[in-house]
Amino acid sequence: MRVALLLLLSVLVPAAAQAETPGEKLFNRKCTMCHKVNGRGGEIGPDLGRVASRLSGAQLQAKVMYPKKSAPSTSMPSFATLPATEMDALLSYLKTLR
Ligand code: HEC
C-alpha cells in the first residue's frame, strides 16, 4: 500500500512542478508573439528571458500598462485594461525571469 502511494506521488509531483502558472499562461497567450523566453517566441520585441534582472517590479508594471511612456514609438500595445488578478499573476511570472 505504502509503495503504491509512493509510486503515485512520484508520478504526480513532477507533473505538478511543470504545470504552467496562471501568469505564464497569460504571458504565452498575450506576449510570446512578440517576445522570447527560453528561446521560444517572437522577434518583434526584446528577449524577456532575463527581464527581471534589468527592470524592477514597478518598471515591469509601468511597461506592461503604459509601454509608450518609456518608448513613444513602440509597437507594444497597452495592457492597462487587464483585470487586477491577471495583472498580478502576469507580474509575478515576469519577476521570475532573471
Ligand atoms: C506587438 C508586439 C508586442 C506585444 C504583443 C508585447 N510586446 Fe512587449 N515590447 C514590444 C516591443 C517592440 C518592445 C521594445 C520597445 C519598448 O520598450 O516598448 C517591448 C518591450 C517590452 C518590455 C521592456 C523590455 C526591456 O528590456 O526594456 C517589457 C517588460 C515587455 N515588453 C513586456 C511585455 C509583456 C509582459 C507583454 C504581454 C502582456 C508584451 N510585452 C506584449 C512588443 C510587444
Image (tube, rainbow, N blue to C red):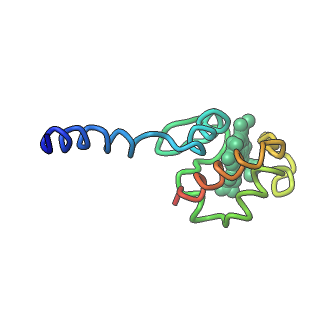
Answer left or right for 51 relative to 59. Answer: left
Which residue sits at x=53%, y=56%?
A: 97
Answer left or right for 82 relative to 98. Answer: right
Query: Residue pushed farthest front?
Result: 1
- In the image shown, does 23 or 94 lie closer to the viewer? 23
Residue 66 x/y as whole percent: 84, 51
Residue 72, relative to residue 39: is it above or below? below
Looking at the rendered image, the quarter that the N terminus falls into is top left
Which residue sits at x=71%, y=48%?
A: 85
For residue 16, which quarter of the picture?
top left
Residue 5, relative to residue 61: is it above or below? above
- In the image shown, does 35 or 87 lie closer to the viewer? 87
For residue 57, which quarter of the picture?
bottom right
Residue 39 x/y as whole percent: 47, 41
Which residue sits at x=51%, y=60%?
A: 98
Residue 17 x/y as whole percent: 38, 46
- In the image shown, does 29 or 8 lie closer to the viewer? 8
Which residue sits at x=64%, y=49%?
A: 89
Answer left or right for 19 relative to 4. Answer: right
For residue 74, which quarter of the picture?
top right
Numbered-mark total: 0
